[in-house]
Image (tube, rainbow, N blue to C red):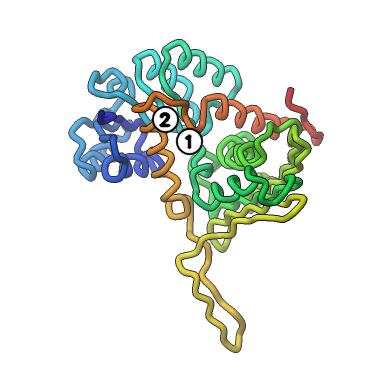
């Protein structure tokens, strides 16, 4: 069976998914793209040899030749597109976040459940080989009982979804990845969130945040996010347990170190997400295609997507009140 997939929204992320589906995903075929920017849609369609190029998502969803959709639009559109695709009987891969509010998330999940279609959320870091190796180490007891997790996630510049640097943008677009990793690495749920804002280029905007988490299994985690990293895309994790520790360092274009009279020098981290997580984006789509064709549970479920939104909204509330927020 070849899964015929349409991509809705072919901006930065949608184009990455379209390229993988067109060239690298066994068992899948890029059947169509939809994008309101007509020139962009036409350009992507021509690049990947796709004849079906739609201006509206509704047209793609209604196409009887489409088995599944990838939703890579702005987050405000995610819940409605999930609901519309589910009602049309299409399986769905949706970029994070699932929605901006719990009401939106629950409506989308209800539609998916009623239709009996698959829904996978795009938390791609779970599929990165380095992060996966750390999780496997924790799961097999390789560092004993997990105690502390530190996650650093600093962007070289704000992406479109959080360009306003409002707390909701930061936590739902950027921090949500780390909130998901906290759940994924620890194998436990977040029960308390405490967020402190970090200043940006001017006093009127939010440049980042430091978030402390308490997990149900008594693990403590910290998240260090910033939207202006002068040296590139900073993606690190350290986990500490009763018998050892494990970590993931930044990936660089090469691993050479040059030593001279000025000191030791090495390459800066890879510039941004497209380079750093290229393999993870491919692997997560392979997992989605398998779950549809083999009728198995998605690797990242709609409930995982909802849990991330719950924690992100708690971070917003914590920042606003200056107090830790418990998750019911």
Asked if disc 1 and disc 2 are in contact, CB closer than 8 Å, the reply is yes
Q: Position of residue 310 (x, y in %)?
A: 65, 27
Residue that carries the numbered disc 2 in the rendered image:
93
For image coordinates 70% across by 33% down, the residue present is: 190
Q: Is residue 316 visible?
A: no
Q: Residues within 10 Å of mark 1 (few under 14, many from 20)?
A: many
In the image: residue 145, left or right of residue 25: right
Query: Which one is nearer the viewer's eye here, 94 or 301?
Result: 301
Q: Position of residue 279 (x, y in %)?
A: 42, 50
Residue 122's label in the rendered image is: 1
Query: Which one is nearer the viewer's eye here, 186 or 113?
Result: 186
For image coordinates 54% across by 47% down, the residue present is: 132
Q: Position of residue 199 (x, y in %)?
A: 70, 50
Q: Quadrant of residue 234?
A: bottom right
In the image: residue 213, left or right of residue 284: right
Q: Callout 2: helix, strand or loop?
A: strand
- The quadrant the C terminus occupies is top right
Residue that sits furthest to the top in the current view: 114
Q: Residues within 10 Å of mark 2 (few under 14, many from 20)?
A: many
Q: Is residue 269 visible?
A: yes
Mark positioned earlier in the residue sequence (1 or 2) = 2
Q: Quadrant of residue 275?
A: bottom left
In the image: residue 185, left or right of residue 327: left
């Amino acid at each position: 069976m070849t899964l015929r997939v349409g991509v809705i929204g072919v901006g930065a992320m949608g184009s990455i998914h379209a390229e993988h589906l067109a060239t690298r995903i066994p068992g899948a075929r890029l059947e169509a793209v939809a994008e309101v920017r007509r020139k962009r849609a036409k350009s992507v369609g021509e690049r990947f040899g796709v004849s079906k190029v739609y201006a509206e998502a509704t047209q793609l969803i209604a196409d009887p030749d489409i088995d599944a959709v990838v939703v890579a639009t702005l987050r405000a559109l995610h819940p409605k597109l999930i609901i519309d695709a589910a009602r049309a009987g299409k399986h769905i891969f949706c970029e994070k976040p699932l929605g901006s509010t719990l009401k939106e998330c629950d409506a989308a999940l209800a539609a998916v459940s009623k239709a009996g279609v698959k829904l996978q959320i795009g938390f791609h870091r779970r599929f990165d080989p380095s992060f996966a190796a750390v999780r496997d180490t924790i799961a097999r007891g390789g560092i004993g009982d997990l105690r502390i997790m530190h996650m650093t996630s600093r962007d070289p510049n704000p992406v479109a979804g959080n360009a306003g640097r409002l707390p909701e943008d930061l936590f739902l677009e950027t921090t949500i990845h780390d909130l998901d990793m906290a759940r994924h690495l620890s194998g436990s749920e977040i029960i308390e969130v405490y967020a402190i804002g970090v200043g940006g280029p001017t006093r009127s905007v939010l440049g980042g945040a430091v978030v402390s988490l308490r997990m149900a299994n008594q693990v403590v985690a910290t998240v260090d996010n910033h939207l202006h990293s002068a040296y590139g895309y900073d993606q690190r994790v350290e986990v500490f347990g009763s018998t050892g520790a494990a970590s993931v360092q930044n990936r660089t274009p090469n691993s050479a170190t040059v030593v001279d009279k000025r000191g030791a020098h090495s390459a800066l981290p890879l510039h941004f997400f497209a380079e750093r997580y290229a393999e993870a984006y491919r692997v997560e789509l392979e997992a989605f295609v398998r779950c549809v064709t083999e009728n198995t549970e998605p690797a990242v479920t709609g409930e995982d997507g909802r849990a991330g939104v719950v924690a992100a909204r708690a971070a917003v509330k914590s920042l606003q009140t200056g107090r830790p927020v418990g998750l019911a």
